[in-house]
Amino acid sequence: MKLCPSLFSLLLTISLFPQLLKAKDDDFVRQPPRRVIFTHHDRSDSDPQQVHISLVGKDHMKVSWVTDSKHSSSLVEYGKQSGKYNAKANGEHTSYKYFFYSSGKIHHVTIGPLEPSTTYFYRCGGSGPEFSFKTPPSTLPLDFVVVGDLGQTEWTNSTLNHIQSIDYDVLILPGDLSYADTHQPLWDSFGRIVEPYASRRPWMVTEGNHEIEIFPIIYPTGFKAYNARWPMPFQESGSTSNLYYSFEVAGTHVVMLGSYAEFKAGSDQYQWLQANLAKIDRKKTPWVVALLHAPWYNTNTAHQGEGDSMRLAMEELLYKAQVDLVFQGHVHAYERFTRVYNNKADPCGPIYITIGDGGNREGLALSFEKPTSPLSLFREASFGHGRLKMVNETHALWGWHRNNDSNFIVKDQVWLQSLSSSKTCSKTVNHDTTSPSRKNEL
């Protein structure tokens, strides 16, 4: 029997490194990295490509796309029936150069006001295919997908297919999108690979280290492609930078922090965060979630200590504001911590979850520190994604879905109680208590 090269490579890897590829708790074989997929442009120059949407305020949506034609208009037509567009909006456009690369015309149009839990059909630039999206609900329950370090590999495709198999309202991503790393055509390819998903549900992202793309003297500030292609609603939350912002949806306040923007006490980001958290009304907004890239808590041997200085600067702000969960990326594995503050278990602290396992080209971070820290409750080096269901004002369900080739397995699941509903932490900070009716609850 003749083995294809990819199968031979997989068998060789498993035979040579079984200790790296097996999980401790089962017989699942850790899959090696898979090839990068470059998705080509197959539409006309005037047709929209790389379409994605993001939330703007409580009832608006930003539609972003790229055209090769410089004459295409920044226009979105939309309505509640397919092919019938009774509303339209004009927006803005931009473009950028990076060495010998010139981007297409990048369009951004904000549409609305929109009704909650409603499907809208839309067309970009007056031509090309019709797209549709569903707006999030205005009240709980609410379903988030959480995925980090996504990239554009065969594992990325697997993750995206699993995400699409169960409906959700909003996707949040704590950094490392395209892994272009200065190779700008990979930004275009990434936009095409995520379009079938990011054009249907809002994607809210923050930056990772792979978005920086600094080149001394010529491009000293970085984030040129990221800021042009993925503008988030930072102005609406009082931020002066696309690298950090917040948004609210259905009783949940989400803070997107910038690991690669200045964060020390007195910095713009620090002062913005302090003011932003102080404005939250927990009676109206019972849940607060934060995202950042470089982990504040991490027992994987990869990227040890890289988020420590940011944690020392900002952790107290999150603790005093009763932040319920912090999602972090960068480490290519999954890990869930108990409620923690200042390196100690604290029932009034956030739950920290590393979710940098979306499908990146660099592969998994397979090595964890030994012995296991008592703060770390679950850890595994596998590709996957997470789902956070805000059930009501007091309880949420978190689950981590590990990728298999043809399906996904829910490997970690836990009920969470909002700190705002905890009597123990209701004064200075909130406290999480265990409900007798819930098993495995934090």
Image: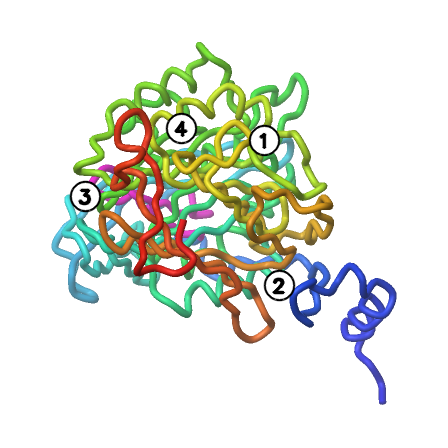
Can residue 387 be seen here? yes
Q: Could you tell me residue 107's position as x and y percent?
A: 36, 41
Residue at image coords 85%, 85%: 2
The dot on residue 59 is 3
Numbered range of the magenta stretch = 50-70
The residue lying at 32 percent from left, 57 percent from top is 436
Tell me the residue that label 1 is attached to.
Answer: 212
The overriding secondary structure of the stretch rendered in magenta is strand
Determine which residue is flagged by label 4: 319
Looking at the image, tell me whether mark 3 or mark 1 is earlier in sequence order.
Answer: 3
User: Which label sits in the foreground, 2 or 4?
Assistant: 4
Q: Secondary structure at mark 3?
A: loop
- Foreground of the two, 290 or 221: 290
Rendering coords of residue 158 (x, y %) = 55, 66
Precedes in sequence: disc 4 or disc 1: 1
Distance between the Cα atoms at labels 4 and 1? 28 Å
- Name above or below for residue 407 compared with residue 183: below
